[in-house]
Amino acid sequence: MGKGNKEGTSKQFRWTKPMEHLFLEILAEEALKGNKPSNSFKAISINRVAEAISKRFQVQCDAKHVENHLRTIKNQWQIICTIRGESGFGWDDNMKIITCDRATYDAAVMAHKKYEPFLNKSIDHYDEMALVVGKDMTTMKRLKR
C-alpha cells in the first residue's frame, strides 16, 4: 500500500509535466496504430502508459490513474474547443495559442476561471491532445488508410 508516496496515507496520484508528456506521447502513438477503435483506448494501450510511467519515474502508476488522467485531458480539450468556438478569440496554429485582446481576456476569465490556463499561452502538446481525445480521430484514421 502507498508505494508511490512517502507518507503512505494519501493515495492520490500526482501527474507532473514530464509524466503527462509521456502519457500523451504514448497514447498518440497508440491512436495512430489503431488502438482507439471508438472513443476509448484498448486496455493494452492504457496498460502500456501505466507501465512506462511507473518504470521511467519510479512511481506506482496503474491503469486507473491513466484512465482518470485521460478524463482530465478530455475535460481540458473540451474547454479548449469551447473557447476556440467563441467569438473574440483567435488561433495561432504555429504557436498553438488561443489569442485574444486584454478586454476579451479579462471578461472571459471573470466569467470562466477555467479558461485562464488556455488563453494567450502556448498549449503544451496540443497536437498529441488532438490525436488522443479529439472527436474526429477515428475519421482521420480511416482517411489515412
Image (spheres, grey):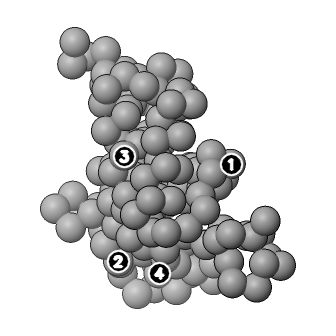
Residue type at tag 4: Tyr
Sequence order check: which comes first, mark 3 or mark 4?
3
Q: Nearer the viewer, mark 4 or mark 1?
A: 1
Mark 2–mark 1 Cα distance, whole angstroms, equals 30 Å
Q: Are marks 2 and 1 in contact (CB under 8 Å)?
A: no
Residue type at tag 3: Ile
Q: Nearer the viewer, mark 2 or mark 3?
A: 3
Residue at 69% across, 84% down: 6
Q: Are marks 1 and 3 in contact (CB under 8 Å)?
A: no
Q: Secondary structure at mark 1?
A: helix
Is 41 left or right of 100, judged from the image as shown? right
Mark 2–mark 3 Cα distance, whole angstroms, equals 24 Å
Label drawn at residue 121:
2
Sequence order check: which comes first, mark 4 or mark 2?
4
Mark 4–mark 1 Cα distance, whole angstroms, equals 36 Å
**Tag 3: Cα neighbours inside 10 Å, few (<14), some, or many (≥20)?**
some
How far across and down, in percent of the image, does residue 32 sit? 30, 30
**Residue denoted by label 1:** 64
How far across and down, in percent of the image, does residue 20 sit? 44, 63
**Residue denoted by label 3:** 26
**Residue denoted by label 4:** 105
Front-lying residue, 71 or 65: 65
Mark 3–mark 4 Cα distance, whole angstroms, equals 33 Å
Sequence order check: which comes first, mark 2 or mark 3?
3
**Tag 1: Cα neighbours inside 10 Å, few (<14), some, or many (≥20)?**
few
Which residue occupies the extreme left position in the image? 94
Sequence order check: which comes first, mark 2 or mark 1?
1
Residue at 33% across, 60% down: 125
Front-lying residue, 88 or 145: 145
Q: Quadrant of the C terminus?
A: top left
Q: Secondary structure at mark 3?
A: helix
Q: Secondary structure at mark 4?
A: helix
